[in-house]
């Protein structure tokens, strides 16, 4: 098996970062056991994804709730870096609130496409085929397969909802999306 040095370093950086966050959460009594992410059906509000502590917890999900979906224009720029931090162009796992009830949601893969202040901007992935021989849904872009899906299923990115995420809420790295696939997503996102 051939390893890319940048990918290995990114994985190790994220693993260390995750371990440190987990240890800090356990000290506060809010974390889950290390290395375990919630089941896909976990609909409870997350207990740990908070911004760095500020006065009275301002800006955290725990105190202020989900900040709402992003409604502006995203300047999507492909910039994955092997620095152990999430960057646009990477597919990561995070707790995503449902549109109809931000207090509920589930852990899922998302494509990072940009940043707005303290928030990362992300698009949800799905393995449900919305673009095929029978139908075309203009709100989805095919991105193919990757290590973000353990079953190797083809994925699509949902364009009509841009989610704000806090870096502390990202649980694990999925993969770096290829630059051409990211360019397709960015082009369609700009046109929508």
Image (cartoon, rainbow, N blue to C red):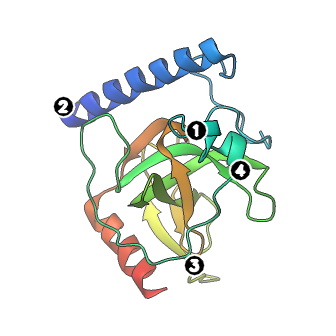
Marks 2 and 3, the one that precedes in the sequence = 2
Please tell me whether mark 3 sits on a helix, a strand or a loop.
Answer: loop
C-alpha distance separating marks 3 and 1: 39 Å
Q: Is residue 112 left or right of residue 107?
A: left
Q: Mark 2 touching mark 3, by CB under 8 A?
A: no
Helix, strand or loop at mark 2: helix
Which quadrant of the structure image shows residue 180?
bottom left
Label 2: few (<14), some or many (≥20) within 10 Å? few
Provide the residue designation for mark 2: 5
Q: Which residue is mark 1?
A: 55
Q: CA distance from mark 4 to mark 2?
A: 38 Å
**How many angstroms separate mark 2 from mark 3 (CA)?**
35 Å
Q: Which mark, residue 65?
A: 4
Image quadrant assignment for residue 113 = bottom left
Q: Earlier in the sequence, mark 4 or mark 1?
A: 1
Residue 1 in picture, x, y percent from top left: 26, 28
29 relative to 9 in the view: left or right: right
In the displayed orientation, state which residue is furthest to the left. Answer: 5
Q: Can you say whether 77 is above or below 175 in the image?
A: below
């Amino acid at each position: 098996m051939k390893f890319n040095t940048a990918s290995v370093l990114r994985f190790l950086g994220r693993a260390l970062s995750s371990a440190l966050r987990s240890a800090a959460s356990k000290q506060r009594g809010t974390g889950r056991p290390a290395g375990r992410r919630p089941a896909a059906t976990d609909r409870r509000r997350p207990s740990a994804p908070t911004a760095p502590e500020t006065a009275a917890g301002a800006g955290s999900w725990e105190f202020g709730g989900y900040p709402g979906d992003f409604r502006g224009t995203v300047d999507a720029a492909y910039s994955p870096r092997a620095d152990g931090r999430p960057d646009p162009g990477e597919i990561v796992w995070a707790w995503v609130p449902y549109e109809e009830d931000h207090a509920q949601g589930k852990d899922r893969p998302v494509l990072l496409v940009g940043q707005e202040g303290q928030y990362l901007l992300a698009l949800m992935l799905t393995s449900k085929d919305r673009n095929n021989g029978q139908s075309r849904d203009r709100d989805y872009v095919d991105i193919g397969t990757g290590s973000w899906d353990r079953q190797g299923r083809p994925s699509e990115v949902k364009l009509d909802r841009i989610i704000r995420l806090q870096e502390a809420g990202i649980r694990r790295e999925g993969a770096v999306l290829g630059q051409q696939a990211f360019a397709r997503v960015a082009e369609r996102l700009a046109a929508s």
